[in-house]
Image: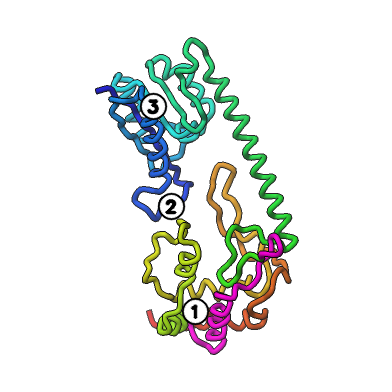
Amino acid sequence: MKKLYLYIRLSDADDDLKFKTESESIANQRTLLYRYIRARREFDGYEAVEFIDDGYSGTNGHRPSFERMIESLKNGEANVVICKDFSRFFRDYVEIGDYLERVFPFLGVRFIAVNDGYDSDDYKGSTAGMEVVMKYIVYSYYSRDLSQKIKTVMSTRKSKGEFVASQAPYGYMKDPNAKRKIIPNPDTAPMVRKIFDLALEGKTPAEIAVILNDYHLETPSAYFMRMNPGSRKFRTSSQEACWSAINVREILKRREYTGVMIMNQRRWKGLDNPRTVWTDESEWKIIPDCHEAIVSESEYEEAQKVFRKIRKGYERSPN
């Protein structure tokens, strides 16, 4: 039986790597590739063999599965390689061009990058490899430029106090009568208020969680799933999820409940890295009076003493 190779790669810069044995991005790439080959009769009868590098950069070829795949191709064990796009195969444009112009033609290997619409069979008898890569470079830089412009627009809107996120924070909802504004949610704002009131009484997040669970009050994730049954967010949460010190603490820490908006809390790690990192609090920019407050600034500051009290307790506890 003839074989075709599916190459799948996830960088250690991609999401979910620390939390899943096999990341969702790997699963998504696999689904895309199998959908592609099933839609083409020419691949009927082929055995699909997967080569997966999970947690390896695409800037060089020092990847175990990649090296095994290339060695197998050199031995003539397959003559088709399919991947999601050029960047999954290599992020070095010169290396991509070398494989398209020299290595794969020499080995008689057909190379397909699905999302880039590239199939080397379309260029038989010509040397279009570098031309395709140059187009890819142009498109890549165009996308980066467009992405940067979008980020600039979003930052400008946020600096004006406009709400630009896709989901309003728990306790708020998007204002149906004003674009890019949020208002207190009549269903959940009272819950936020209750949590702050309990903190102002001196109760810790753990004690507050016990009280909320004793009254069987709905958690933020349960409320979201009830209001958005078709959403994939919180899809791994149990229907029996309960309040904990963690989700109570997250609510008490949100300064947005005082009516402010906070900018520059996170920044991108780099152009080719989709992950963001927290910035130092000194870099944050606070925009006041952006929306109706659920708690006052003084109440927010008073509630933060709960955390300081807990930290002091830990400092005094014996080793």
- Of the residues shown, which amino acid type is indicated by label 3? Arg
Quarter of the image with the C terminus in it = bottom left
306 is higher (above) or lower (below) than 133 = below
Secondary structure state at the residue bearing disc 1: helix
- Of the residues shown, which amino acid type is indicated by label 2? Asp
- The spot of residue 186 in percent (x, y) is 59, 76
Q: Report if residue 233 is visible in the image.
A: yes
Would residue 138 be found to the left or right of residue 88 on screen?
right
Quarter of the image with the N terminus in it = top left
Query: Quick one: label 1, few (<14), some, or many (20+) residues within 10 Å?
Result: few
- The spot of residue 299 in percent (x, y) is 63, 83
Residue 181 sits inside the magenta stretch = yes
Secondary structure state at the residue bearing disc 2: loop
Q: Residue furthest left?
A: 1
Pointer 2: what residue?
16
17 is higher (above) or lower (below) than 135 = below
| Residue under the image location 41 percent in, 48 percent down | 24
Q: Which mark is residue 311?
A: 1
Secondary structure state at the residue bearing disc 3: loop
Pointer 3: what residue?
40
* Quadrant position of residue 41: top left
- The spot of residue 146 in percent (x, y) is 66, 41
| Residue under the image location 56 percent in, 77 percent down | 192
Region of the chain picked out in magenta, as a range? 176-204
Label 2 vs label 3: CA separation?
Answer: 31 Å
Sequence-first tag of 3 and 1: 3
Of badges 3 and 1, the one in the foreground is 3
Query: Quick one: label 3, few (<14), some, or many (20+) residues within 10 Å?
Result: few
Of badges 2 and 3, the one in the foreground is 3
